[in-house]
Amino acid sequence: MSGHNKWASIKHKKAATDSKRGKIFSKITKEITASARANGGDLFSNSRLRVAVNKAKSVNMPADNIDRAIKKGTGELPGVLYEEIAYEGYGPKGVAIIAESLTDNKNRTSADIRNIFSKKGGNMAGSGSVSWIFSKKGFILVAVSNADEDTVISVALDAGAEDMKTEEGMYEVTTSVSDFEKVKDALEKSNIPIESAEITMIPTSTVKLEGSDAKQVLSLIEMLEDHDDVQNVYANFDIPDELIEEG
């Protein structure tokens, strides 16, 4: 099981219990606005916007909020212009980390992210320094308790999924970006409940961590995740199962 997938599971658990609903809504609103600004407000032709809106619905964001965010992106309503920046760096023990952000003040956000890396024992690096370790993929989680393994494998692979693993009580379905929505739709049409579905970055290799090193990396990543401008954090670590429960 890759470090990314463990972190994805931790993020899923956090999202299910996180009481900071306002911060979650704010980050999704930024993504919807940026998606609409980049590729238009039509959900059918803008797959990135469609994924963002589905994410908003999964956390029960009001429809009015979603509509306003789209209109701010298309210019129908006044809105902030967000710049998309991916910060790359290394955590303790050489763990590769990417923090994707949407910001209206690049200087402020860059300084903040650099400070977080430094404070938690890591360091920023130049563009492209760690991104080569990751591949952009679709990633879908289905609870083992909600579906039969053979059924999930059959439906997912027939729809174009690249791989499926069973880890930590979850079926982890990996797809190409282009086939992500097709696989997700096939699972939903087969009445297979989906716990989480996202376009993400999966590492091709991982760094094995234990003890204080693992906790330090988790602390760094969680601090990055908590920053208002950071949308997603990806890292290539592998940690003991008991630290997942603590996370």
Image: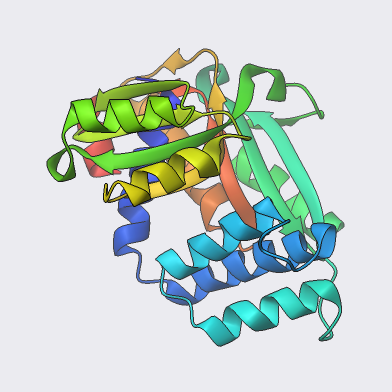
As drawn, is 172 to the left or to the right of 94?
left
Q: Quick one: 203 or 213, which is closer to the camera?
A: 203
Q: Residue 119: where, in percent of width, then height?
A: 59, 42
Residue at horizontal 29 percent and vertical 41 percent from the top: 142
Instruction: Please determine whether, in this image, residue 156 is positioned above or below residue 143.
Output: above
**Front residue of this view, candidates 149 and 246:** 149
Residue that appears at 30% across and 26% down: 153
Q: In this view, does 44 lie to the left or right of 174?
A: right
Between 178 and 30, the one lying in front of the other is 178
Image quadrant where one finds the N terminus: top left
4 relative position to 111: left or right: left
Name the image quarter holding residue 74.
bottom right
| Residue 102: percent from left, percent from top | 73, 57
Residue 228: give x, y in percent of width and height: 62, 63
Query: What residue is drawn where x is 30% and y is 51%?
Result: 13
Q: Nearer the viewer, residue 182 or 230?
A: 182
Identify the residue at horizontal 35%, vertical 27% (top origin): 212
